[in-house]
Amino acid sequence: MMRLQETVKSFFRGISIRKKLKPLIVFLATVISIPLLIVAVQSQQPVTVKVLIQALEAAQLEPIVKDFEAENPDINLEIVEAPNDTNKVEDLYTSAFLLGESPYDLVYMDIVWTPKFAAAGWLKDLSDRVSQEELDQFLDGDVNGGMYDGGLYRMPFRSDAGMLYYRSDWLKDAGYEPPETFSELMKISQALQEEGYTDWGYVWQGKQYEGLSAMFVEILEGFDAFWVNPETLEVGLDQPNAIEAVKFLRSTIEENVSPPGVTTYSEEPTRRLFQNGETAFLRNWPYVYGLASESDIAGKFAIKPMPHAPKGSNGACQGGWGMGIAKNTDHPEEAWRVVKYFSQAKTQKKYALQTGYVPSRRELFNDSELVEKYSYLPELLNVIENAVLRPPIAQYSQASDILQRYLSAAIAGTMEPEKAMNAAARETRTLLKRSQS
């Protein structure tokens, strides 16, 4: 009986204590549950992955972004618009990384940025995320352009290569075959000018900017010369063949094959001259083909690899863009899913059909739907597979600045080619030596 009484008393004491503790229990439950609720809500929100891209291409990529987010509802792919000047975009990425905590999870890179960004430790090595079998599906130049010091830091998205456009109707009418050598290019240009077909024979990018370096890589290859050997860091700008390459460019102006204003031309001014029927030959990128095909010269032009000197070979400068992952991203797995999506065949095909940009996957150059719209693709594949990389060195930006300054002076006639290239080679060697010490 006593045991029963004690049990009853204990029960009622428990009720009393629970009543007193109830406010505390409610408070503790609230404090604990709110963070748990916040975590639960946050876990259901999409992860935001940011990337900086030129404004023009950012707009072109909107359908791709929508498709990606539809297939990956847990990721919000945010494109931050940048200026259309690629040099300014590179500067913005560089500034962000130098500040220590870049706001970008992905890096949309021009092919020549990879060595600089990788050497600085700003990118994740992607080598363990993709097999060699998968990489073999891409053009060699695009893959090599994403490599640095044995690692893979950039997956290809779209490709590019310089080529020679020519007025096939004029050549046929005048009885000429497309030129294979630089001397043939000059001879045919002068003949067409004399016969009244055109004002100018050949236009190219002579402005002091990155396009000048890209164009010159092709001329160097054509003369069996080189800029910088990335393995030995040997500089070849002051070698006889390299100086002959500069003299050739200067001769196009001196002999009135190229207009004097070519030293101020970038891609677009040269494209317009070609489309307007004011030149027979044009060095430019594949994007011109689609635009020219919708102009008055549609069906009247063709493309081929760049000419060369008797002992040289065709040179096409390898261009292109791809995706890397920022080293300090908080979302590496989500970023990789974006990279994979952009590099897959269906994405590249849709983007090529939409924009005319060149894919980086080899199979797409013979895709029936793409070839129906862009008949030049099979021919372009041969050009791109012989493409030449600009020196994949960490100091590329500085080396390109040096080359541009002296090459501009040489083709404008303010410095003799030999003197200009000797100075360019000397400064480049100093740059590379300083960076090694």
Image (cartoon, rainbow, N blue to C red):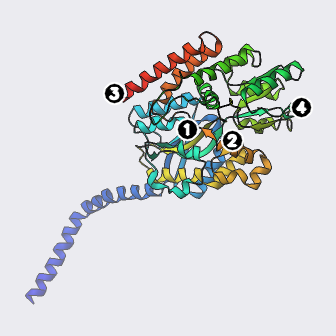
Q: Could you say which is closer to the camera, residue 394 or residue 219?
A: 219
Where does residue 381 sit, x and y in percent of width and height? 69, 46
The amino acid type found where label 4 is placed reads Gly
The amino acid type found where label 1 is placed reads Ile
Mark 1 vs 4: CB contact within 8 A: no
Quarter where residue 313 is shown: top right
Instruction: Please give left or right for residue 78 compared with residue 394 in the image.
Output: right
Rendered residue at 45%/51% (across/down): 127
- On the image, numbered disc 2 is attached to which residue? 383
User: How far separated are the C-alphas under marks 1 and 2?
Assistant: 17 Å
- On the image, numbered disc 4 is attached to which residue? 175
Instruction: Please give left or right for residue 267 compared with residue 105 in the image.
Output: right
Would you call the spot at circle 4 few (<14 residues within 10 Å), some (14-19), or many (20 or more)? few
Please identify the residue farthest to the right as the structure is shown. Answer: 173
Q: Nearer the viewer, mark 1 or mark 3?
A: 3
- On the image, numbered disc 1 is attached to which residue? 111
User: How far separated are the C-alphas under marks 1 and 3?
Assistant: 26 Å
